[in-house]
């Protein structure tokens, strides 16, 4: 297993070295781990997140290790901030070889209790930011006849359940958009992929609990390490395909909704019931 890992790292270095990779949501979780891994493989990583101090800490660690990293503080929920960011990228940076739309957040609880600003925030970050960055960077990839856009999705996009109505809808949008764009770009040299993750050990769960009226997400107990999640994305760069499931066994969720949807309708909501204080 260890030998296979180091073989993958060598292949990654050959594939990624010298390329420019833009990663959103890069101050923590999957984005942060990808920043370290890809910089170590010789890529120049361009990192976007809303917390400058965390971005700077990631940049410093990469540079100490001999890598290259640029950072931008940007709240992707803010449309004006996104436009400023896009203008900066297009005017001042090297062409983007790989775009990883990783930024996103969720909320767990009854939709009827969900704060309106959280609804708007999920739509802005999970959907609109992804669309705008893709629209800005894709023409350059098409002109060069190469590039890879990777969208970080979730099994919730195809397996919606109680407590994550808006989050599931945002990931379903991501799935549909990725599939359509992948088909539009066949033969162009530009790859488009979505990684449908199950639970990953990131700040997502802490955030879902801490936001107003939020709750603990039941799937947290099944979460995989962030290092494993990042390796899956790295393999996707090496062997592009339209969709992957992480872990791979989650492909079964494509069948579960059709086969057991009625049972889930009855049993699933029990997980969301209010606790009696």
Image: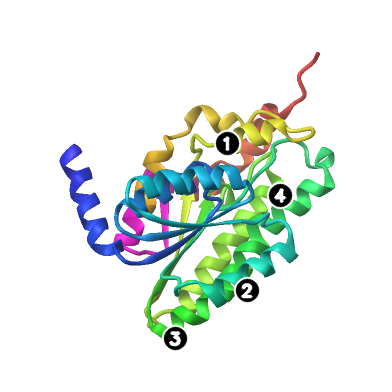
Marks 1,3: beta carbons within 8 A: no
Q: Which residue is mark 2?
A: 87
Location of the N terminus (image quadrant)? top left
Residue at image point 51% right, 27% down: 221
Marks 1,4: beta carbons within 8 A: no
Task: Say whether residue 126 is magenta.
Answer: no
Label 4, residues with CA under 10 Å away: few <14, some 14-19, many ≥20: many
How much space separates mark 4 and mark 2, taking CA atoms?
Answer: 29 Å
Question: Where in the figure is residue 207, as x and y percent of width and height?
Answer: 65, 36
Q: Which residue is mark 4?
A: 166
Residue at image point 76% right, 19% down: 275
Q: Which residue is mark 3?
A: 143
Give the camera-side residue of 273 and 35.
35
Q: Quadrant of residue 263?
A: top right
Confirm whether residue 230 shows in the render. no
Residue at image point 29% right, 61% down: 238
Q: Which residue is mark 1?
A: 203
Name which of mark 3 and mark 4 comes first in the sequence. 3
Give the camera-side residue of 207 and 26.
26
Q: Nearer the viewer, mark 3 or mark 4?
A: 3
Q: Which mark, by number, is residue 127?
A: none
Q: Nearer the viewer, mark 3 or mark 2?
A: 2
How much space separates mark 3 and mark 2, taking CA atoms?
Answer: 19 Å
Give the camera-side residue of 9 and 255.
9
How much space separates mark 3 and mark 4, taking CA atoms?
Answer: 35 Å
How much space separates mark 1 and mark 4, taking CA atoms?
Answer: 18 Å
Label 3, residues with CA under 10 Å away: few <14, some 14-19, many ≥20: few
Question: Where in the figure is residue 52, as x and y percent of width and height?
Answer: 60, 48
Specify start and end residues of the magenta stretch as a single range: 234-253
């Amino acid at each position: 297993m260890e030998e296979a890992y180091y073989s993958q790292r060598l292949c990654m270095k050959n594939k990624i070295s010298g390329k420019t990779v833009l990663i959103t949501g890069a101050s923590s979780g999957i984005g942060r781990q990808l920043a370290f891994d890809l910089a170590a493989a010789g890529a120049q990583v361009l990192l976007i997140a809303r917390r400058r101090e965390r971005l700077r800490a990631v940049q410093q660690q990469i540079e100490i290790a001999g890598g290259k990293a640029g950072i931008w503080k940007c709240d992707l929920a803010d449309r004006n901030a996104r436009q400023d960011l896009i203008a900066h990228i297009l005017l001042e940076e090297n062409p983007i070889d790989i775009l990883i739309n990783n930024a996103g957040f969720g909320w767990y609880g009854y939709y009827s209790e969900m704060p309106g600003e959280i609804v708007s925030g999920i739509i802005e970050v999970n959907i609109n930011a992804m669309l705008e960055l893709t629209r800005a960077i894709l023409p350059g990839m098409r002109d060069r006849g190469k590039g890879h856009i990777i969208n970080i999705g979730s099994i919730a996009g195809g397996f919606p359940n109680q407590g994550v109505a808006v989050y599931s809808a945002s990931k379903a949008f991501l799935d549909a958009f990725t599939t359509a764009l992948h088909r539009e770009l066949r033969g162009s040299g530009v790859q488009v992929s979505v990684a449908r993750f199950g639970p990953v050990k990131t700040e997502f769960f802490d955030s879902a609990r801490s936001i107003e009226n939020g709750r603990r997400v039941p799937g947290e107990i099944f979460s995989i390490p962030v290092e494993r999640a990042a390796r899956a994305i790295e393999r996707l760069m090496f062997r592009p395909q339209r969709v992957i499931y992480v872990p791979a066994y989650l492909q079964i969720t494509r069948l579960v909704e059709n086969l057991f949807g009625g049972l889930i309708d009855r049993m699933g909501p029990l997980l969301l019931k209010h606790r009696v204080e």
